[in-house]
Amino acid sequence: MVKNIKLTEKEISIENVVGSFKLKGKLDLREINDKFKEDSVFNEQTFNYGVVVLKIKKPKMSFLIYRTGKVICAGAKSVESTKNSAKIILNLFRKAGLNNTLSADVVINNIVATGNIEEKINLNLVSENNFNIDYEPESFPGAIYRSKDPRGTILFFSSGKIVCTGFKEVKDILKTIDAFVDHIART
């Protein structure tokens, strides 16, 4: 039986935050790749239009830069770092002699976080009493809970460990975990 436990933001670990933003105008990907040759890879065939993958070390994150000006930032360990990613890329561009400006602000697309509710979960019992939980131990050792509001997915394991994905805000992760733990505490 699981007690009604409330996790705090300090008790979950953000593993990856994906965000996107738009720079003004069309970008010359060959020029960008040439300026950042040590830290970038240009693949002209990717997505029919080409993409430059630029990896930076501090803060550690990767940028997928498209000809259209769209930029996807992945690998950041915090929402704040991801929100600052547009400033980071614009600063790198400016230092490399590539002038550009922001066309659309950073939008958080996905947060991946892990945590532990510090209680064993009887996944068979939980899945029998809940229609919106997928649990097939023959194919995957965790129970899959898909939240509709807020939208996201949480994987629960019998050890009490959890993996959250698809959420756009940390508070939504905590809200969904709390609702799920409250629900299974009554099971």
Image (cartoon, helix red, strand yellow):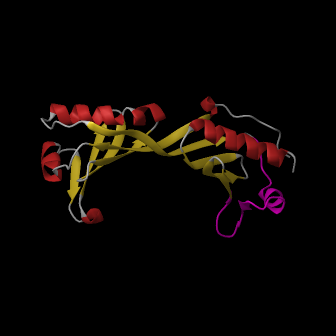
Figure disc tally: 0
In-front residue for pair 173/37: 173
Q: Would you say 61 lies left or right of 144 here?
A: left
Image coordinates of residue 28 in percent, x first then y, are 15, 50
Can you tell which quarter of the image residue 51 is in?
A: bottom left
Question: Residue at position x 61%, y 35% from top?
Answer: 171
Q: From the viewer's perspective, tell me whether residue 66 is left or right of residue 13.
A: left
Q: Nearer the viewer, residue 119 or 32?
A: 32
* Relative image position of residue 135 (x, y in whole percent): 72, 63
Q: Is 7 covered by the magenta stretch?
A: no
Residue 72, placed above or below residue 13: below
Residue at far bottom of view = 138
> Which residue appears at 31% of the width and 44% of the height?
22
Magenta stretch: dominant secondary structure: loop
- For the question of whether residue 117 can be seen, the reply is no
At a point 22% along the width and 48% down the height, the residue shown is 40
> Which residue is drawn at the image coordinates 74% and 34% (left, top)?
6
Is residue 130 one of those drawn in magenta?
yes
Where in the figure is residue 42, as x and y percent of width and height?
21, 55
Q: Quadrant of residue 104?
A: top left
What span is colored magenta in the figure? 119-143
Q: Is residue 96 visible?
A: yes
Q: Is residue 6 above or below residue 166?
A: above
Query: Which one is in front, 35 or 98?
Result: 98
> Residue 66: x percent and y percent?
26, 53
Depth check, front residue: 154 or 70: 70
